[in-house]
Amino acid sequence: MRLGVLDVGSNTVHLLVVDAHPGARPLPASSHKVELKLAEQLEADGRISAAGEKALLEFVGSSLTVGEDLGVEEVIGFATSAIRDAPNGQELLNRVRTETGVELRVLAGGDEARLTFLAVRRWFGWSAGRLLVLDIGGGSLEIGAGLDELPDVAISLPLGAGRLTRDRLAGDPPDAESVRSARRYVRAEIGRVVRDVVRGGVPDQVVGSSKTFRTLARICTPMDDEGPARTLRRADLSAWVPRLAAMTESERSGLPGVSTGRARQILAGALVAEGAMELLGVESLQISPWALREGVILRRLDAVMSASGPGL
């Protein structure tokens, strides 16, 4: 079947069209996305602004047109922390449904962590052993750990790169005290859950998913022996954090893999990644090409396979 996965994230709103069949690897066919940065388009009371609502509705409408042109049979829509945390989030979801017919499911933070973990597990396989998965989005940090396809630990913290930038890293570049304050806040939040994460045992493999981790890996180790960087080392990241803090957005956008839209947030992402790696005792991690979107697709395919009954 040809699926359209509509991902309303805190940074990017993305329609991914895939050819997907139970038991087979989903194959991307087309991608349609825009950086709306909903996590930053907020009023003083936390409501998503009128401009943010308008931009989202326009994108969903254009995505339906793209999907129809590409022969999409089913659209799976979901939203994450920007909609989940906004006081007018449900109101906006109702508008989307009324005006476009698209039903967006709001994922709880724990569900984000579980679906991302599922995608990473399928990518790396059972031979990876006990996994620790870290994912930095625009609005939240997800942490998953476990031996199976469903993690023993599934945690979501309000440490997304967009949220942290908006709330604690004003300025271009932010002043030194703001950076120190943000760093303390990040580590205090992660520190509260360290015991829950590590009590299951030492992971056999640590994985970072999401655009933030991929970008940080490219900054810290632009190329490795197999092409684009697939490993992020904490020592390299720690060396880069003060450099990123001293750079303007324009200077950051000139770094490998840093788009203009991501340049403002990459310092916050680096502070969260460094804090998580240090407090959880991670010296290096592998980069996963699969994350939340793929987890949503895999869960849908599992449901199709389950409904079809046993194959033998």
Image: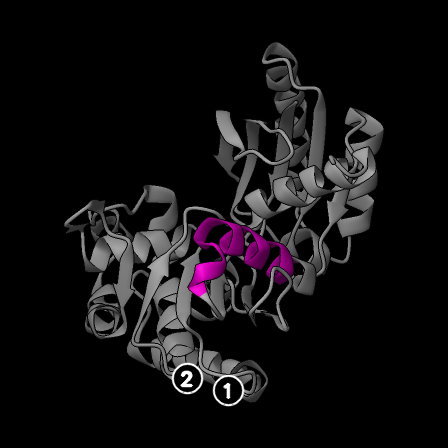
Compared to residue 57, the image places residue 268 above or below, namely: below
Residue ranking furthest to the front: 312
Q: Residue at x 35, y 77 (%)?
A: 282
In this rendered view, identify the residue nearer to me: 97 or 50. Answer: 97
Residue ranking furthest to the top: 69
Classify residue 212 as left or right of residue 139. Answer: left
- Image location (x, y in percent) of residue 85: 70, 60
- Image location (x, y in percent) of residue 280: 43, 81
Tell whether label 1 touches label 2 (CB within 8 Å). yes
In this rendered view, identify the residue nearer to me: 218 or 74. Answer: 74
Residue identified by numbered label 1? 191
Q: What amino acid is labelled 2 in the image?
A: Leu
Secondary structure beneath dot 2 equals: helix
N-terminal-most mark, 2 or 1: 1
- Image location (x, y in percent) of residue 77: 70, 37
Residue 193 sits in which quadrant? bottom right
Compared to residue 277, the image places residue 58 above or below, namely: above
Q: Residue at x 59, y 17 (%)?
A: 66
Compared to residue 59, the image places residue 221 above or below, namely: below
Q: Which mark is residue 169?
A: none
Residue 157 sits in which quadrant? bottom right
- Which stretch appears magenta? 112-128
Q: Say whether residue 239 is magenta.
A: no
Asked if residue 280 shows in the view, the reply is: yes
- Magenta part mainly helix, strand or loop? helix
Q: Colour scheme of this structure image?
A: one colour
Secondary structure beneath dot 1 equals: helix
Q: What amino acid is labelled 1 in the image?
A: Gly
Residue identified by numbered label 2? 279
